């Protein structure tokens, strides 16, 4: 009986209180943006993910909320379009490969350059340290320092460690994003 009430309640929520939000996922090439989005939308993780050319969009449904997720290419030639796809969204997710120390300075530089844009002022930022399943990786505190997150102002900023491969901490990501469903 309780199951039936739950189904009816979910249906009512979806029908009369449907909410769609825009989320843009950025970060350097190979960070795991496409892998994360694939797993969030219910598909299997694959090790042979193809680099994104331009962008890719997927909807992730959680209850009455639809997260319309924009996954942008991270190679240098695609970075100039990040700002355009971040304008007006409910939240920006910046993904970092926490096992690739060589790329961290570049990730920090790109993130800070983007966050300086007046067009993106106030948009909440979630920094995700991906690939926590790998052995030599940064902790969340080390990532916060390496990305100099304390110096990003005029917005809410959070940082989590995740693994798209092992689906670690992904519920926390969704919960955080859903706080900003209503701008
Ligand atoms: N070990 C491990 N590998 C991962 C994880 N997430 C992604 N990868 C791998 O990292 C590589 C790059 O993943 P993508 O999701 O294509 O990276 P991307 O950020 O979309 O890259 P671009 O589209 O080029 O910007 C692939 O080989 C993935 O299988 C993870 O959590 N753990
Ligand atoms: Mg990609």
Image (cartoon, rainbow, N blue to C red):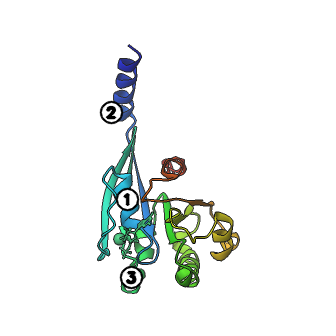
Ligand 1 picture quarter: bottom left
The residue nearer to you, when weighing 107 against 16, is 107
As measured in the structure, the alpha-carbon distance from the residue carrying label 1 to the one carrying label 2 is 25 Å
Q: Position of residue 108 (x, y in %)?
A: 58, 79
Labels 2 and 3: the sequence-earlier one = 2
10 Å crowding of disc 1: few (<14), some (14-19), many (20+): many
- Residue in the image at 51% along x and 67% along y: 134
Q: Classify mark 3: helix, strand or loop.
A: loop
Q: Position of residue 46 (x, y in %)?
A: 32, 62
- Residue in the image at 56% along x and 80% along y: 101
Q: Position of residue 105 (x, y in %)?
A: 58, 84
Q: Position of residue 107 (x, y in %)?
A: 53, 79
Labels 1 and 3: the sequence-earlier one = 1
Q: Classify mark 1: helix, strand or loop.
A: helix
Q: Quadrant of residue 73?
A: bottom left
Q: Quadrant of residue 30?
A: bottom left
- Residue in the image at 35% along x and 35% along y: 14
Q: Is residue 47 left or right of residue 174?
A: left
Disc 3: which residue = 75
Labels 1 and 2: the sequence-earlier one = 2
Q: Which mark is residue 15?
A: 2
Placement of the N terminus among the 4 image quadrants = top left
Q: Foreground mark, 2 or 3?
A: 3
Instruction: Tell whether circle 1 marks a residue whose Cβ is less than 8 angstroms from ligand 1.
Output: yes
Q: Foreground mark, 1 or 2?
A: 1
Q: Is residue 43 left or right of residue 171?
A: left
As measured in the structure, the alpha-carbon distance from the residue carrying label 2 to the one carrying label 3 is 40 Å
Disc 1: which residue = 37
């Amino acid at each position: 009986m309780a199951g039936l009430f739950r189904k009816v309640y979910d249906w009512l929520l979806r029908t009369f209180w449907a909410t769609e939000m825009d989320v843009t996922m950025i970060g350097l090439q190979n960070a795991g943006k496409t892998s994360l989005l694939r797993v969030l939308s219910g598909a299997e993780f694959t090790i042979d993910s193809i680099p994104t050319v331009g962008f890719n969009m997927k909807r992730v449904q959680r209850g009455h909320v639809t997260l319309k997720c924009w996954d942008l290419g991270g190679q240098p030639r695609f970075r100039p379009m990040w700002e355009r796809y971040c304008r007006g969204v409910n939240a920006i997710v910046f993904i970092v490969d926490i096992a690739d120390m060589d790329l961290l300075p570049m990730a920090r530089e790109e993130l800070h350059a983007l966050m300086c844009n007046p067009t993106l002022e106030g948009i909440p930022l979630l920094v995700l340290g991906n690939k926590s399943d790998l052995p030599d990786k940064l902790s969340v505190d080390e990532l916060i320092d390496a990305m100099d997150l304390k110096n990003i102002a005029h917005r809410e900023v959070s940082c989590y460690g995740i693994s798209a491969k092992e689906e670690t901490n992904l519920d926390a990501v969704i919960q955080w994003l859903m706080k900003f469903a209503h701008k």
